[in-house]
Image (cartoon, grey):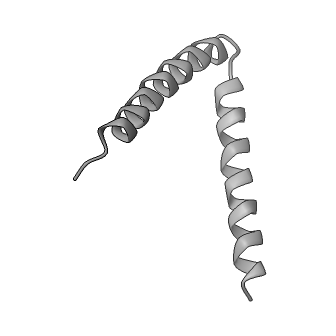
């Protein structure tokens, strides 16, 4: 069936992550363009990680 303890951990993580994300976004929004720069950096980091992983499998 369903492991309710594990489900509670995921729900709690989602709530805490959402709260921290909203709080961080509010702080970054005060600095014009900072949120865009952070997002762009994250996208580039994921792209590099994906490229390295795919080249490693060749």
In the rendered image, the residue lying farthest to the left is 1
Residue 14 place in picture, x, y as percent:
43, 31
In the image, 5: left or right of 28?
A: left
Residue 48, placed above or below residue 1: below
Give the residue displayed 77% in from the left and 70% down from the top.
Answer: 52
Q: Would you place residue 55 above or below residue 23 in this image? A: below
Taking the spot 25% from the left edge, 48% from the top edge, the residue there is: 2
Residue name at image x 42 percent, y 27 percent:
12
- In the rendered image, the vertical position of residue 38 relative to residue 32, given as above or below: below
Quadrant assignment, res 54: bottom right
Residue 31: name its quadrant.
Answer: top right
| Residue 6 coordinates in the image, percent (x, y) | 39, 40
- Which image quadrant: the C terminus? bottom right
Seen at 49% across and 18% down, the residue is: 19
User: Is 24 left or right of 17, judged from the image as shown?
Assistant: right
Question: 37 or 11: nearer the eye?
Answer: 11
**Residue 33: percent from left, percent from top:** 69, 25
Q: Is residue 41 above or below residue 51?
A: above
Q: Position of residue 22 (x, y in %)?
A: 51, 19
């Amino acid at each position: 069936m369903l492991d309710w303890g594990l489900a509670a951990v995921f729900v709690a993580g989602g709530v805490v992550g959402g709260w921290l994300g909203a709080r961080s976004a509010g702080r970054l929004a005060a600095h014009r363009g900072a949120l865009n720069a952070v997002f762009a950096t994250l996208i580039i980091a994921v792209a590099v990680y994906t490229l390295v992983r795919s080249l490693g499998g060749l």
